[in-house]
Amino acid sequence: MRDFMAVGRSVAVADNGMAATSHPQATLAAVEILKAGGNAIDAALAAVAVQGVVEPQMTGIGGDCFALYAPKGGAPIALNGSGRTPAKTDAGRHAASGSRDVPPTSPESVTIPGAIDAWCTLSRDHGSKPLSEVFAAAIDAAENGFRITPRVAADWAAFRTRVEDLPDAAAQFLPNGNVPAIGDKRAQPALAATFRRIAREGRAGFYEGEVADDIVATLRGLGGVHDADDFAAQRSDYVTPISTSYQGHDVVECPPNGQGLAALMILRVLAGYDVAALSEADRIHLLAEATKAAYRARDAYFCDPAAGQVDAALFLSDTYISAIRSKIDMTKASAPETWDDTEHRDTVYVTVVDRDLNAVSLINSLFYPFGSGIYATKSGVLLHNRGWSFRASPGHPNSLGPRKRPMHTIIPGMLMKNGRAVMPFGVMGGHYQACGHANFLSNVLDHGMDIQTAAEAPRSFAFDEVLELETTIPDAIKDDLSARGHNIKWADAGIGGCQAIQIDHTRGVLLGASDHRKDGLALGF
């Protein structure tokens, strides 16, 4: 039971269906679909479509998607909805120029958006309602307008530089040169028309015809090599999930090119300790050391499986994990993990459980806030810049190449017990996500927190030579960690954001959580 004198939120409680997202309008859209008889897939797609309208700095149909779907009583299914580079990509272009990264606002940074194919695949294979009904709330918000919520306004202001020097994007997202304020009303009529076209034509409404032509023309006008064949060829892939055991549960993730394997590695390291008995400083230190080790492997090896095989069994083996544990000194920080590539920031996460206990864990992203800033005006599509995360050096598993997927940070999670889903969950926050998955699950399974309290708990993240702490962590713990050799930095803002739905099969109860770092909520009926 939480402390009702302290600032916080109770878990949401329901039994007929529940959704949890980072935006109230998206959560409401999902619940309305559930109440109208739709299933978890229908509701999750309704929510993420709304978020692409009302959180345009975070996500949209010009981005990528990953999903885990656990039918009632069944094994989880994983879908990789990330896009590939154009076939005519010059693999050596940036190596020859000596640049470290693909320019983040260049057409080369835009891989073919995978989200719409992923959504249409999920709807076709597992949904129950037509896309016209699923997209109705998103179309209404885009056509008739939506109000700006506080976190959206803050992000919009913080990252306005992405679009302010790009005339087409600035005209849409900075009206009269201004950032919309809390409560302002905005609309995206061109995007509404594109949603209507996709609702009528399915994936062809995006990857063929007027919308694809508009996007290709926009990119080619900027010097891109994208063509109609690249868009027509984009397909999502069902992939085999990967998992590990933790505290009597199975934690399921999507395999690389995502970083879910890193989350499992961190949990495997933690499993060798009595985490519940550790002090808070010890716990943060251990999480930091496990994170640095897992991310070293991630940065060196994780990539598009079509370009290089990543042996999950090896990275999760007793031999590999024992070697990591043997190097952890609980009194001293190890060498910092240095990141020499681009930062991943913007994502939305959606989870839905329906009355039949089908569970969806879905994540969608533009990569950087406002993506590439490249805006196709006729179709209203803001394009991501996921290709910015490719390494410029030839020979690296995650180097730039034709028809290739980059390493992704976005990862949906699913907790299983005795072969059944007991909690779809996700933690937004770019690179933090793998660490965040492990930390959130440890809060629930090691410390016995309810999922709302676990989501709200103070966070830390060891990355890029610093150990970042949220300001809710006491100074005494900061000083303890500094004494162990950690380079401490207070976080400028809350680290990430979390949504989860816990399924109590015995009582037939759903418990939902959405943390305070975003505008959203969990809601059921």
Image (cartoon, rainbow, N blue to C red):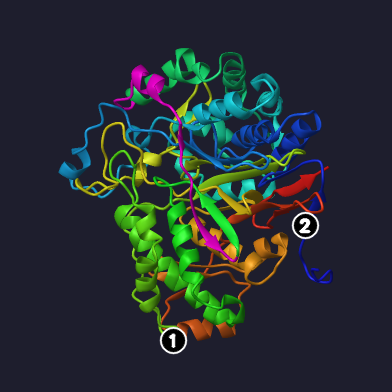
Tag 2, which secondary structure? loop
Q: Which is nearer the N-term, disc 2 or disc 1?
A: 2
Examine the structure image and report whether residue 235 is included in the region drawn in magenta: yes
The residue segment tinted magenta is 222-247
Residue 309 visible in this rendered orientation of the protein = yes
Residue count near mark 1 (Cα–Cα under 10 Å), binned few <14, some 14–19, many ≥20: some
Residue located 68% across and 44% down the image: 23
Examine the structure image and report whether residue 521 is included in the region drawn in magenta: no
Residue lying furthest front: 418
Q: Is residue 67 left or right of residue 356?
A: left
Numbered tag placed on residue 331 in the rendering = 1
Can you say which quadrant of the picture contains the N terminus? bottom right
Q: Residue 379, image x and y in percent?
A: 52, 21
Q: For the residues marked 2 and 1, what is the alpha-carbon distance in whole angstroms?
A: 36 Å
Q: Is residue 176 left or right of residue 110?
A: right
The foreground one among 310 and 497 is 310
Residue lying furthest left: 96
Q: Is residue 46 left or right of residue 439?
A: right
Please name the residue that numbered disc 2 is placed on: 11
Q: Is residue 464 above or below residue 126?
A: below
